[in-house]
Amino acid sequence: MATIFTAWQGVQERIAKAAAASQRQSSTISLLAVSKTFPSEAIRSLYLYGQRAFGENYVQELIDKHAALSDCNEIIWHFIGPLQSNKTRSVAELADWVHSVDRFKIAERLSAQRPEHLPDLNVCIQVNVSGEASKSGVAPAECMELATKICQLPRIKLRGLMCIPEPTQDLTQLAKQFTLLRNLQNQLITAGMDTDTLSMGMSGDLETAISEGSTLVRVGTALFGARSYPDNSSLL
Ligand SMILES: *Cc1c(COP(=O)(O)O)cnc(C)c1O
């Protein structure tokens, strides 16, 4: 318990320092606790300390943890993993946010399946900023068109953009990838879309992401420790 609390405080300090270094208010950067592969009890501990936003990558884990933590009714669930179209319904019903929309078909299904009694589902478009063939995300050149189409759908609200850069020790190369996302976001704003979220930065690179304008960092390892990924495709 003490350990996870200390880790949580440590991450908040890193965010505060990085914000100060860029003359930003740390209140403009939110912390998403990425709890994938960790048990509900780990989420509950952080929730009791005051953390509200939690991120999950696998639909089945979202379903299980949502049920196990139904009494923690202020949790804001973010789905951040790859989403197949046959799995969108649970996400539309259980999540408050989806960061990984990278094709119109997924957005259409989330829109159609979002229950009417719930507030609009917040979505971010995932952009492939590194150009690696293996990475999910829309190509930067296609971001504007996808965003324009998503904005016309009911019951989902485009909030901004998300990226997972190519890991590199070269901070200039890393910053370039974050800058690309910020520039795309500025284009959406210029085109009249009221997007406010730049979901970028993880345990290893949150300082660089914040210096490039991140408004939401997604942090797993630095809070919960190293993951041993379950080798189990049924989780996907
Ligand atoms: C796992 C994951 C994270 C957290 O990564 P850490 O390096 O553990 O902080 C952030 N974003 C996405 C999309 C992830 O899948």
Image (spheres, rainbow, N blue to C red):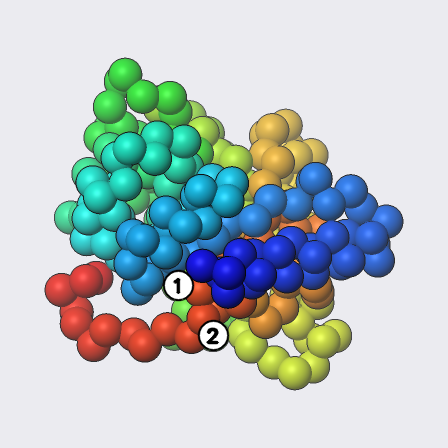
Residue 104 in view here: yes
At label 2, which amino acid type do we have? Glu
Looking at the picture, tell me which residue is in the foreground, 109 or 40: 40
Residue 169 falls in image quadrant: bottom right
Looking at the picture, tell me which residue is in the foreground, 120 or 179: 120
Give the percent coordinates (x, y) of residue 194.
60, 29
Q: Is residue 211 left or right of residue 234?
A: right
At a point 23% along the width and 54% down the height, the residue shown is: 61
Disc 1 residue lies near ligand 1 with CB under 8 A: no
Query: Quadrant location of the N terminus?
Result: bottom left
What is the spatial separation of the Cα atoms under label 1 and label 2, in whole angstroms? Answer: 9 Å
Q: Which mark is residue 136?
A: 1
At label 1, which amino acid type do we have? Ser
Give the percent coordinates (x, y) of residue 30.
60, 44
Outermost residue toward the front in this view: 2
Please tell me whether mark 2 sits on a helix, a strand or a loop: loop
Please tell me whether mark 1 sits on a helix, a strand or a loop: loop
Q: Is residue 32 above or below residue 177?
A: above
Looking at the picture, tell me which residue is in the foreground, 138 or 56: 56
Q: What residue is shown with label 2?
A: 132
Give the percent coordinates (x, y) of residue 219.
51, 60
At a point 62% along the width and 36% down the height, the residue shown is: 196
At a point 66% along the width and 35% down the height, the residue shown is: 189
Residue 98 falls in image quadrant: top left
